[in-house]
Image: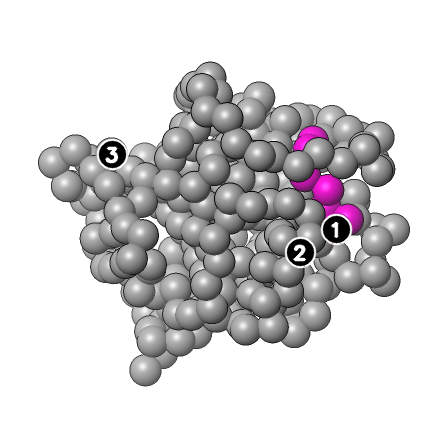
């Protein structure tokens, strides 16, 4: 996923995955994101979360200048960004640039996301310890590693097989044992592990896929960019009420590459 930030827009080029172009499906209600409304719960679960001393000072500097100074306030997300070694998720040629607040190429025409956007999307999900989270688009694996700091139940799907295999190998090597991965078409979600409390999608969608809505628990949240491919989209936070109604929240303008797979058939 490639991200370019300006004062007005965040342009994101994400790994091609599973959505079709077209108009977003109608949603019931819409309002604007207020970052200050984010709530945080205490961590009451215990699970293995690997720790790395190498390049800790660089991670700390990134967190201060690229995360906190950019407006991220959730202390659990901030701590997650501090703990995950981004340099382990980039090719060796990009090691020296790992702690810049920029996207970096990871091969197969894709990039690792800008750290600020990773933190923002994690903050928008408002993950509680114990939540089951589905990620559509594993990519380098970095984003799921950050999410696994917040809950041990992470399920990630990648349609580009070499990337999915590579990310799984990195998880095994580093000790991220709570992340489960799958090579497949994320449009359909992951029915075997549904329902999910939170779902995150990392590529442009013309609409919110019905299977993801179906696999979302009442009270759950989806974070997804919605809009036509190759045009400016809107990063949305989608809520499923306890009664099963769908409401949406506009966050900011973004631009993602279109997803591929079943939605293009």
The quadrant the C terminus occupies is bottom left
- Asked if the residue under mark 1 is in contact with the one under mark 2, i.e. CB atoms within 8 Å, the reply is yes
| Residue named by callout 3 | 219
Q: Residue furthest top?
A: 42
Majority SS type along the magenta span: helix
* Residue found at x 40% / y 75%: 261
| Residue named by callout 1 | 88
Above or below: residue 130 compared with residue 162 = above
**Is residue 165 part of the magenta span, yes or no?**
no
Judging from the image, what secondary structure is the residue with disc 2 in? Answer: helix
What's the coloring here? one colour
**Is residue 86 part of the magenta span, yes or no?**
yes
Range drawn in magenta: 82-88
For marks 2 and 1, give the one nearer the viewer.
Answer: 2
Q: Is residue 235 left or right of residue 86?
A: left
Above or below: residue 219 compared with residue 74 = below
CA gap between label 2 and label 1 equals 8 Å
* Residue 76 visible within the image: yes
| Residue named by callout 2 | 170
Q: Nearer the viewer, residue 42 or 221?
A: 42
Q: Please provide percent x and percent y for residue 14.
A: 55, 62
* Residue found at x 83% / y 60%: 92
For marks 3 and 1, give the one nearer the viewer.
Answer: 1
């Amino acid at each position: 996923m490639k991200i370019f930030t300006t004062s007005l827009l965040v342009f994101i080029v994400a790994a091609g995955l599973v959505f079709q172009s077209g108009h977003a499906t109608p949603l019931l209600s819409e309002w604007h994101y207020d970052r200050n409304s984010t709530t945080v719960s205490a961590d009451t679960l215990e699970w293995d979360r690997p720790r790395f001393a190498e390049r800790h000072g660089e991670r700390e500097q990134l967190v201060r200048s690229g995360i906190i100074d950019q407006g991220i306030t959730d202390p659990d997300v901030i701590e997650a960004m501090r703990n995950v070694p981004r340099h382990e998720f980039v090719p060796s040629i990009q090691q020296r640039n790992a702690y810049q607040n920029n996207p970096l190429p990871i091969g197969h025409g894709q990039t690792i996301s800008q750290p600020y956007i990773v933190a923002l999307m994690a903050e928008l999900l408002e993950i509680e310890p114990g939540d089951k989270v589905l990620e559509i688009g594993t990519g380098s694996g970095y984003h799921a590693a950050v999410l696994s700091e917040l809950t041990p139940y992470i399920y990630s799907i990648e349609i580009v097989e070499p990337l999915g295999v590579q990310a799984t190998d990195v998880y095994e090597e580093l000790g991220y044992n709570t992340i489960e991965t799958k090579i497949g078409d994320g449009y359909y979600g992951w029915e075997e592990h549904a329902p999910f409390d939170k779902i995150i999608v990392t590529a442009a969608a013309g609409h919110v896929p019905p299977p993801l809505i179906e696999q979302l628990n009442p009270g759950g949240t989806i974070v997804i960019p919605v809009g036509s491919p190759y045009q400016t989209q809107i990063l949305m936070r989608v809520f499923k009420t306890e009664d099963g109604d769908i409401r949406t929240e506009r966050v900011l303008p973004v631009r993602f590459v279109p997803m591929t797979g079943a939605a293009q058939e």
